[in-house]
């Protein structure tokens, strides 16, 4: 067996690990472990021990499969804005881990004295309850033992990746890379440091925060295997989808949905769009990425299933075939993200008839995601940004329905990763590239999609969508 890299991906619904052949990029083995979570209106949280244990269970299965002798490195990626507060003496989480989807800190965001312009220019992001700093302050105000740990100097605060690294290294490593640090709203992307003005606005100090390292760096070891990469999940997925070059774009449909466009190493700030960071190393500065997240994608269909819609996303192609009535659906579950950032919006459906079916409604939700993503791409084009190539990834795009819809409405060709596990592959690819392994030789299977409707039909559909959209955002209350 040749040299291997183990990729770890701690995600919103599962902790995953994959054993990846360094020479070819082929997945030799993989393990997914569901992560239990608590969810109710506006709140989503995890138990710290359960979250860590699920990731270690997945890792251990990879080690049991091959042993540690042929593992060159471990690459870690994770959900970015989910935040953990733990005791540096015990390593235990001091309160529930608030997911990036958790919005209970909305009032804290609203009361921050700094303007959104300041946040955008310093962090590349906007002050919303879905990033970490408002959650940190909310926990300090609502969990007395968290506040006590802060006062006596025992509080550690960091993204999920930092918590996992701390536990894996038995407290020796307290660190993260810029792609994670940025999502706290406390990291200045211009200076690449924790920012005193931002910290002060939330009443925090940088003593509780992790050391900033490069994405590819020394993150300790586990069972004598070096941990060499710490990278945000969307950046990892995009690395597997050709986003390594300026002008390349990627749409990733997972629990949420994200559009990312590589704009090179010159910073740019576009109203309503996030300016994010790609991976870096000691030898390479990060590229800048224009990022536009939707608040929902896979979570929209989980919600619909909880409402009583009996269907499986594995049958999406069949659902699309059975859908006959043209219903319009604004997928504003938890509001809308870029470029509106309106969290008061709610889902809106229009066009229901007596003959409407379950399949009509489900497919209208799929089309709604496609249209909202199209809105984002057209918005960026209106700001002067062009796309040299577009690739789609993520579990929701697997059967080809979303890629075809996107190609049709945009009237451009696009490609789709045949490999579903782009986040795991991408983390391994960045790690391998920095270990002088030729990742260009990795086998990638891409499916191509070209428009199957006329430009006139595409324009007609989009005009109808925009009329509905303008009406729907006024109806949502």
Image (cartoon, rainbow, N blue to C red):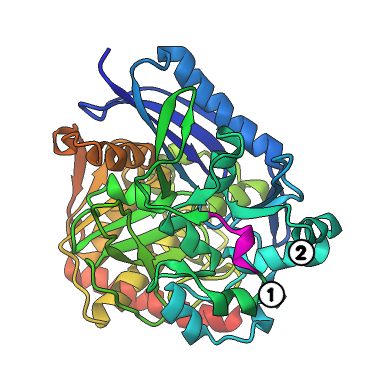
Q: In the displayed structure, does residue 281 sit left or right of residue 412? A: right
For mark 2, give the secondary structure. helix
CB-based contact (under 8 Å), mark 1 and mark 2: yes
Of residues 227 and 456, the one nearer the viewer is 227
Q: Any mark on residue 311, and which?
A: none
Q: Residue at x 36, y 71 (%)?
A: 376
Task: Write down the quadrant of residue 461 in the picture.
Answer: bottom left
Look at the image and tell me whether residue 79 can be seen: no
**Crowding at mark 2 (Cα within 10 Å: few <14, some 14-19, many 20+):** some
The residue beneath circle 2 is: 140
Q: Nearer the viewer, residue 311 or 62?
A: 62
Residue 101 in magenta stretch: no
Q: Which residues are magenta?
A: 205-210
Dividing the image into 4 quarters, which one contains the N terminus? top left
User: Which numbered disc flags the more N-terminal residue, 1 or 2?
Assistant: 2
Q: Which residue is mark 1?
A: 203
Residue 468: percent from left, percent from top: 46, 77
């Amino acid at each position: 067996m040749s040299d291997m890299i183990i990729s770890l991906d701690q995600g919103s619904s599962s902790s995953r690990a994959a054993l990846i052949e360094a020479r070819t990029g082929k997945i030799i083995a993989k393990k997914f472990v569901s992560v239990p979570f608590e969810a109710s209106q506006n709140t989503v949280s995890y138990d710290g021990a359960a979250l860590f244990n699920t990731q270690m269970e997945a890792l251990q299965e990879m080690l049991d499969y091959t042993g540690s002798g042929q593992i060159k490195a471990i690459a870690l990626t994770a959900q970015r804005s989910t935040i953990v507060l733990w005791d540096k003496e015990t390593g235990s989480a001091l309160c529930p881990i608030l997911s990036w989807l958790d919005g209970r800190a909305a009032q804290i965001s609203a009361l921050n004295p700094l303007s959104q312009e300041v946040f955008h220019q310093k962090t590349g992001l906007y002050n919303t309850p879905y990033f970490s700093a408002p959650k940190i302050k909310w926990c300090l105000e609502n969990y007395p033992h968290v506040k006590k740990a802060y006062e006596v100097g025992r509080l550690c605060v960091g993204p999920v990746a930092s918590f996992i690294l701390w536990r894996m290294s038995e407290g020796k490593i307290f660190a993260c890379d810029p792609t994670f640090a940025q999502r706290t709203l406390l990291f200045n992307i211009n200076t690449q440091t924790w920012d005193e003005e931002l910290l002060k606005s939330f009443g925090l100090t940088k003593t509780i925060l992790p050391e900033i390292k490069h994405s590819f760096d020394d993150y300790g070891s586990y069972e004598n295997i070096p941990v060499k990469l710490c990278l945000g999940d969307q950046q990892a997925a995009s690395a597997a989808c050709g986003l390594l070059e300026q002008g390349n774009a990627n749409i990733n449909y997972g629990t949420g949905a994200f559009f990312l466009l590589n704009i090179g190493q010159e910073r740019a700030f576009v109203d309503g769009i996030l300016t994010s960071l790609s991976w870096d190393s000691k030898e390479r500065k990060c590229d800048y990425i224009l990022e536009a997240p939707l608040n929902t994608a896979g979570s929209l269909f989980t919600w619909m299933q909880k409402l009583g819609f009996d269907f499986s996303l594995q049958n999406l192609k069949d659902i699309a075939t059975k859908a006959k009535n043209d219903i319009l659906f604004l997928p504003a579950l938890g509001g809308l993200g870029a470029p509106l950032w309106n969290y008061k919006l709610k889902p809106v459906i229009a066009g229901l008839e007596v003959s409407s079916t379950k399949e009509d409604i489900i497919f209208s939700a799929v089309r709604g995601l496609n249209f909202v993503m199209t809105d984002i791409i057209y918005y960026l084009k209106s700001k002067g940004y062009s796309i040299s190539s577009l690739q789609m990834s993520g579990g929701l795009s697997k059967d080809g329905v979303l890629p075809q819809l996107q190609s049709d409405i945009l009237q451009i060709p696009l490609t789709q990763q045949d490999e579903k596990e782009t986040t795991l592959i991408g983390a391994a690819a960045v790690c391998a590239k920095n270990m002088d392994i030729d990742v260009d030789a990795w086998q990638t299977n891409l499916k191509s999609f070209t428009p199957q409707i006329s430009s006139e039909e595409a324009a007609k559909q989009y005009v109808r969508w925009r009329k509905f959209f303008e009406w729907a955002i006024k109806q949502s209350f």
